[in-house]
Amino acid sequence: MSNFTQISKFFETEYPLNKEGLKELFNSFQVETHKKGELILQIGNFENQLRFLNSGSVREYYVSPEKETNTLFYTKPQFITDFSSFNNDTTTKKNQEALTKIELLTIEKSTFRKLLQKYDCGKSFIDLTFQKILEHKEQFEYNRITKSPEELYKELMAYKPHWLQSIPQYHIASYLGVTPETLSRIRKRI
């Protein structure tokens, strides 16, 4: 049960299921480990697993011909699945890379969907998940458009200090849309 402590907490607080449903769900998960630097999701692939980050750090990013742009870091136990690809059976536009050694709990999409149907909770789980993703995306876009990189860095200091302690600064710079040198200047001013 030790591998399932974090995901159990998630379901207790975020999305309560009945005990039989949780037991069957947990029994369906597989434990995977990945080394630092491994891609766990790549542009153009289908998201065929529901993935829960049990431990470690992951960066999510987009790639253009000129650069990679970080959009999110996962440093706490949570689902890291590209839910748009997962739910719509489309290819993903994102990459995810392990920034440290990570442990994932994974379940195949078909198995997960059967469980959601069996326990009649699929629509509410998907709706809740998409609502949270949409709220995060809206806030992220608003901040990128209306705030300076310095203001964004101050917000990270206030709301995500663990990112600043555990994520390499060049990745933080990419997230803020600045060069590492500019980030260094921002840090000196603050």
Image (tube, rainbow, N blue to C red):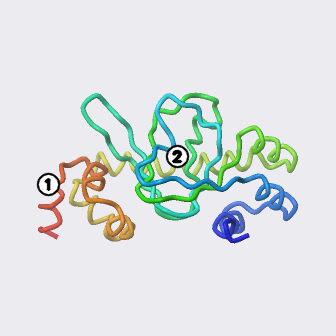
Question: What secondary structure is marked by label 1?
Answer: helix
**What residue do we see at 85% from left, 65% from top?**
19
The residue at which mark 2 appears reads as 134
| Camera-side residue of 27 and 50 | 27
Residue 41: % across, % down: 51, 40
Amino acid type of disc 1?
Answer: Thr
Q: Is residue 188 left or right of residue 71?
A: left
Q: Nearer the viewer, residue 170 or 145?
A: 170
User: Quadrant of the image for the C terminus?
Assistant: bottom left
Figure quadrant of the N terminus:
bottom right
Considering only order in the chain, which callout, 2 or 1, is on the residue closer to the N terminus? 2
| Residue visible at 75% across and 45% down in the picture | 112
Q: Which mark is residue 182?
A: 1
Q: Nearer the viewer, mark 1 or mark 2?
A: 1
Determine whether 27 is above or below 177 in the image. below
Determine the secondary structure under disc 2: helix
**What's the amino acid at mark 2?**
Leu
Q: Position of residue 133 (x, y in %)?
A: 54, 48
Q: Position of residue 127 (x, y in %)?
A: 67, 46
